[in-house]
Amino acid sequence: INAAYMGVVFLATYLTDTRLHLPHILCTVGYSMTSFLVVVPVTFWFTSAKLFYLLLLTVGLSSAISLGRTIKVATDDPKKGQIMALLTGASHLLFLLYLRWANLA
């Protein structure tokens, strides 16, 4: 699943002519996934939906915004940059939601 997530980001950056190479994408996405290392274990130990959504809105959203901004800056066309920022930020948050609910199953 993690490789599929990075594959989607790489494909989207390739299609929108973003000036990022695969190692840079892997480093950027990997760095933004450190929020997963905070949110998933804490909500596993303390099974509270309120705590999960609080961490999602603080830690997860801040790393999604950081990831989106990094990819937006590397895109030449401003319109494509906004699309890439929204796409990568949304996929980051959706992957965090997937990890949360796959963890509870």
Image (cartoon, helix red, strand yellow):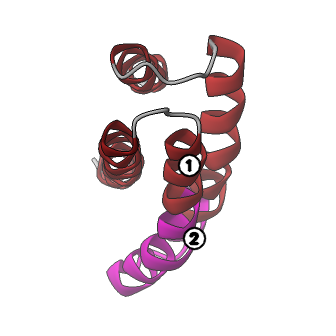
- Where disc 1 sits, the SS reads helix
Give the main secondary structure of the magenta stretch. Answer: helix
Q: Can you give x and y, in whole percent of width and height, for residue 59 in the image?
A: 57, 70
Side (left or right) of 17 relative to 15? right
Which stretch did the figure color magenta?
40-63
Residue 84, quarter of the rendered image: top left
Looking at the image, which is closer to me, 90 or 71? 71
Q: Is residue 50 magenta?
A: yes
Disc sitting over residue 86 in the figure: none
Q: Quadrant of the N terminus?
A: top left
Disc 2 marks which residue?
59
User: Which amino acid, mark 2?
Assistant: Val
Q: Please report whichever mark, 1 or 2, sits nearer to the chain's N-terminal start.
A: 2
Residue 49: in magenta span: yes
The residue depicted at 37 percent of the width and 54 percent of the height is 93
Could you tell me residue 76's position as x and y percent?
49, 32
The Cα atoms of the two marked residues, 1 and 2, are separated by 12 Å
Residue at 43% from the left image edge and 77% from the top image edge? 57
Rendered position, 76 above or below 93: above
* Residue, disc 1: 67
Eye-nearest disc, 1 or 2: 1
Tag 2 secondary structure? helix
Q: Residue at x 33, y 37 (%)?
A: 80
Taking the image as shown, residue 70 lies to the left or right of residue 9, namely right
Residue 81 versus residue 45 in the image, above or below? above
Q: Which amino acid, mark 1?
A: Leu
Q: Check whether the beta carbons of the residues at disc 1 and disc 2 lie within 8 A of each other.
A: no
* Mark 1: few/some/many CA within 10 Å (<14, 14-19, 20+): many
